[in-house]
Structure formats: C-alpha cells, structure tokens
Image (cartoon, rainbow, N blue to C red):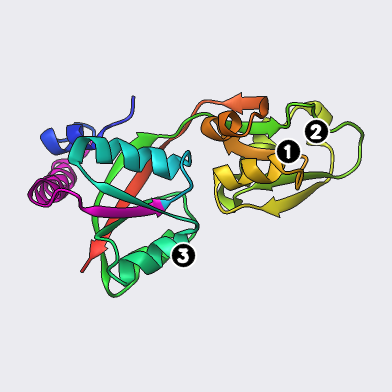
Amino acid sequence: MATTPDTAAAEPVPALPGPLAGAYGRRWRTVVDRWARHPGTAVATLGPPGTSSHLTAAFLAERHALRIELCDTFDAVLGALVDRRVDQALVPSAYQGATRFHWHRDLRLDAYFAQATPEYGIAARADGTPDGAGEVTVAALWEVRRIFGDLAPPALADRPVRWVDADSTQHAAELLAAGDADLAVTNAPGVRRHALRWVVRRPGAEIVWLLFGHR
C-alpha cells in the first residue's frame, strides 16, 4: 500500500532508522504547514491530464488546496520553477533528468514520498495488434521502454523495435491513436482517454516522488 504524504507527515515510517525517519517527517511537516498558510500554492508537474505525475499532483492538491500547473515536458517544469512562475515542482525519481533539479544551485529538495502509479502496459489501437514479423514501432517515454521488453508476448518479443519518442504516457497514447506508432507503452488513463486496448498490462509501481522548491 502506498505511503501517502499525510501519513508521512503524521508519523515516522517504522522501517527507516530513527534519524532518517525524523528528517522525513520534519520535511513533510514543514511543507504541509507552508501549504496550510498559503492556500493555492502553485506546483508544476508533467501533463497532460492522466499522466502519473498529474494523478499524484491531483492527490496532493485535493488534500492541501494546491494549484497544479501542467507542463508539456520536464524541461518546462524546471523552467517554470527556476523562473518562479510556480512555487514547487513535482518530479518522479524515475525521471532520467531528475539530477538537473537536484544539482540546480537555485533549487532545493523540499520533501519526498512514495506513491503508486496506475496500471502500465503495452497498448494497441482498438482495431488490433500489428501482424507479421517485421519491424514494429512503439511510442514510449525513455524511462518506461523497459516495460515493453519485460511484458511483450512471444508474437512481439522477437520483432525489431523502432522507438517513437514520447514526452509523457499520454503523448505515447496520442501518438498511437493518431497512427504514428503501432503500439505504445502507456498507462490506464491513456488507454481510456484514446479508446485503446491493452495487449498486456501490469500493476502500477510504487515510486518515490520528489518535491523541489526554491533555495
């Protein structure tokens, strides 16, 4: 079961050593208290609606009266935070460019927490899975390409893959729906939003989410 931000703020996580648990709790208390003093705090993360980042941000917004700003890329999220157009940025630890936030001289890590994503998997258009033995084009974020290799059924596993770069899970689903790819690695909201169908899917993964603010 995912550890929610509210839970983390209320009590230490027993599995952590004492000093780490204390630091974890103090960070969350500081952030939650700040949100309570400033309703409408603006938090930027990756859109469009339906991305795992958006769903996690919405989870926080509902409980803490935040204002969520969705950006097309994490580069845009970083820019919005550095330019002080938002107060904080929500970034998944799995994002390959997260170090750009960590090492930016004007930013700091405000808090972190674990939260599960929705289901992920390989999706096809409703009219079927590509047949044959030739190359198959797959739209996916770089960070989730591995899911294709882990889940692909035998009929797809041995076929050469040409990757179509996507900016988000929803963008991957959009590329597939538009005919720009044969398959997509996306999440459950992407499948629903674009009337796709699952080829194979897996439960969501619990990952660590990072909240960055201004130093």
Please give the residue where the numbered disc 3 appears in the rendered image. 75
Disc 1 residue type (three-letter): Leu
Q: Quadrant of the C terminus?
A: bottom left
Residue 194 placement (x, y as % from top left)? 62, 34
Report the span colored magenta: 16-45
Q: Nearer the viewer, mark 2 or mark 1?
A: 1
Please give the residue where the numbered disc 2 appears in the rendered image. 156
User: Which badge, 2 or 3, comes first in the chain's sequence?
Assistant: 3
Please give the residue where the numbered disc 1 appears in the rendered image. 183
Left or right for 180, reference 118: right
Q: Nearer the viewer, residue 176 or 186?
A: 176
Disc 2 residue type (three-letter): Leu
Left or right for 177, reference 208: right
User: Which badge, 2 or 1, comes first in the chain's sequence?
Assistant: 2
Secondary structure character of the magenta stretch overall: helix
**Residue sitting at x 56%, y 43%:** 169
User: Which badge, 3 or 1, comes first in the chain's sequence?
Assistant: 3
Left or right for 197, reference 187: right
Q: State the image quarter where residue 200 is shown.
A: top right
24 within the magenta span: yes
